[in-house]
Amino acid sequence: MNELTLIQPDDWHIHLRDGDALKTTVPHVAQHFARAIVMPNLTPPVTTVAGAEAYRQRILEQVPSGVNFEPLMVLYLTDHTDPAEIHLAAESTFVHAVKLYPAGATTNSASGLTDIANAYSVLEVMQEVGLPLLIHGEVTDSDIDVFDREATFIERTLRPLVEKFPKLRVVFEHITTREATEFVTAAPDHIAATITPQHLIYNRSDLLVGGIKPHRYCLPVLKRETHRLALVEAATSGNPKFFLGTDSAPHAKHTKESSCGCAGCYTAPHAMALYAQVFEAQGALDQLEAFASLNGPKFYNLKPNAHQIRLTKADQLIDQSFDFLGDQKLDPLMLGETLSWHAELIS
Ligand code: NCD
Ligand code: ZN
């Protein structure tokens, strides 16, 4: 197959940052994606509906003219989130979810939850109004090995949580393990997961063997090959519980190529080509539209997009480090490598 036309996709997990960073990140996401779930881990985080509305406007100001792009906003759950804010969110037209970061789990998670019990009254309301909880699923205990933090989170936090709140809609974000694919597959229909391109393409040896590759470093960290294979199987299975979420997370080049490098892979400009490569290798290009364009809207109770995107089999050299935050640079994942697909919005 050399050409593929799909309903225009959405990105159900992205980091756009704020301020001048939006000048780089917004045009990139809007090139191929019609909508995106915009993560709220700014400094300070987006914790209120009013804050989300203002952030949404700043994003919209950077959408190139003639391009349709809708940011879907998310509130950041803290120990102090007021259940009344959840009612406001549910009544708004632009807040689509609430994000749970365990405090200390990842970039800008310092204001996250220190104990899941601190959010019970908020989760009660979310369950009642049907607002999805998006979860960064890793424990933060220093005695748990970094490669085991997702699997441990499932048993210690997630399984008890979905038992306590049996109707709460949950997206297990950027899953990285076989345990996570099995948990989500066995769970009821209102429990879903996003999968990034980097976790479908790489395992932990690709991160560490032959010299550390800082642009492949993200959280949750890449796992061993058996987990990558489970993720590929889940993404390409056609199971509606799994959908596209790039977790594209820009960090300036010098902050990744550093003695204490930041976590996050920047994939927004090439995401569709990256996913197409994975689905092609699996002989599952016929499942790409479900994963990229249908399963996400279904979970979020939104309509699939009206426009279409064309994927063409054509070499695409990733040759550009982008301008970022004035005089800084932003390297995309796979800079200097050639992809075998090219994506283009057609109508
Ligand atoms: C994300 C970021 O940089 O904001 N980083 C990452 O490695 N994925 C945060 C996150 O989603 O964990
Ligand atoms: Zn993320």
Image (cartoon, rainbow, N blue to C red):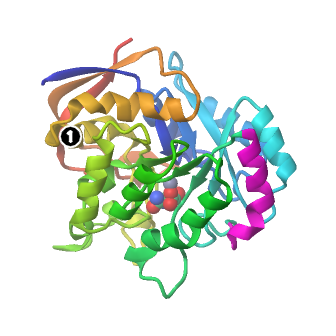
Nearer the observer, 129 or 304? 129
Q: Image point 31% across, 53% down: which residue?
A: 231
Q: Which residue is mark 1?
A: 277
The residue stretch that appears in magenta = 113-129
Q: Is residue 43 visible?
A: yes
Helix, strand or loop: magenta stretch? helix
Number of numbered labels in the structure image: 1
Q: Is residue 239 left or right of residue 4?
A: right
User: Where's residue 65, x and y in %?
Assistant: 54, 19
Q: Quadrant of residue 323?
A: top left
Q: Quadrant of residue 312?
A: top left
Q: Image point 76% across, 61% down: which residue?
A: 120
Q: Which secondary structure, mark 1?
A: helix
Q: Is residue 212 left or right of residue 76?
A: left
Nearer the observer, 264 or 192? 192
User: Where's residue 59, x and y in %?
Assistant: 62, 35
Residue 114 higher or lower than 41, as above or below = below
Assign the N terminus to one quadrant of the image: top left
Amino acid on which disc 1 is placed: Gln
User: Where's residue 177, x and y in %?
Assistant: 35, 63
Q: Image point 53% across, 20% down: which residue?
A: 68
Q: Residue furthest right?
A: 84
Q: Is residue 192 left or right of residue 131?
A: left
Q: Image point 43% across, 65% down: which residue?
A: 220
